[in-house]
Image (spheres, rainbow, N blue to C red):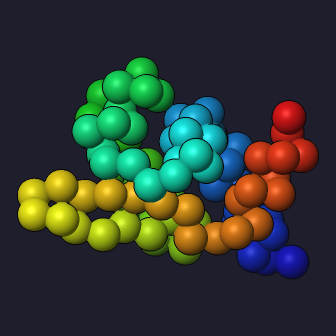
Amino acid sequence: MKEKIRLLKALSDETRLSIVNFLATGEKCVCEIFPHVKRTQSTVSIQLGKLESWGILKFRREGRWIYYSIKDGRVYKVLEALK
């Protein structure tokens, strides 16, 4: 039950929900995410860090680029329910 509550709390923030919704289409570089969600790079980086620490997202480095993707498959079910 606590895991479900944590997931819903994470997605209750508009910026985090926008990020996750964008990442539902596939892995993205941070440089693609912040313009899409119309927030500053620092704001997006903070929210990405939170989502990663909560186990919702994962990331990988490729040179100087960082790519994020959805780690927790339940996210797709929540996004589908919100449509």
Q: Is residue 45 visible?
A: no
Residue 58 position (above or below residue 14): below
Residue at the far front: name it: 26
Residue occupying image coordinates x 46% and y 28%: 37
Left-right relation of 4 to 14: right
State the quadrant of the C terminus. top right
Q: Is 17 located above or below residue 65 in the figure?
A: above
Q: Is residue 11 above or below residue 44?
A: below
Residue most extreme to the top: 38
Q: Residue furthest left?
A: 64
Residue 22 x/y as whole percent: 55, 39
Can you tell which quarter of the image residue 67 is in? bottom left
Give the quarter of the image for residue 14. Answer: top right
Name the spot of residue 4 as percent of width and height, x first: 80, 69
**44 left or right of 80 in image:** left
Please report the residue visible at 70 percent of the width from the left and 69 percent of the height from the top: 73
Residue in the foreground of this view, choosing between 42 and 30:
30
How many numbered tags mark residues here?
0
Q: Is residue 17 left or right of residue 77?
A: left
Residue at the spot 39% in from the left edge and 38% down from the top edge: 33
Q: Is residue 51 left or right of residue 21?
A: left
Q: Which residue does the image show at 10% across and 63% down from the upper left?
A: 63
The answer to whether residue 47 is seen in the rendering is yes
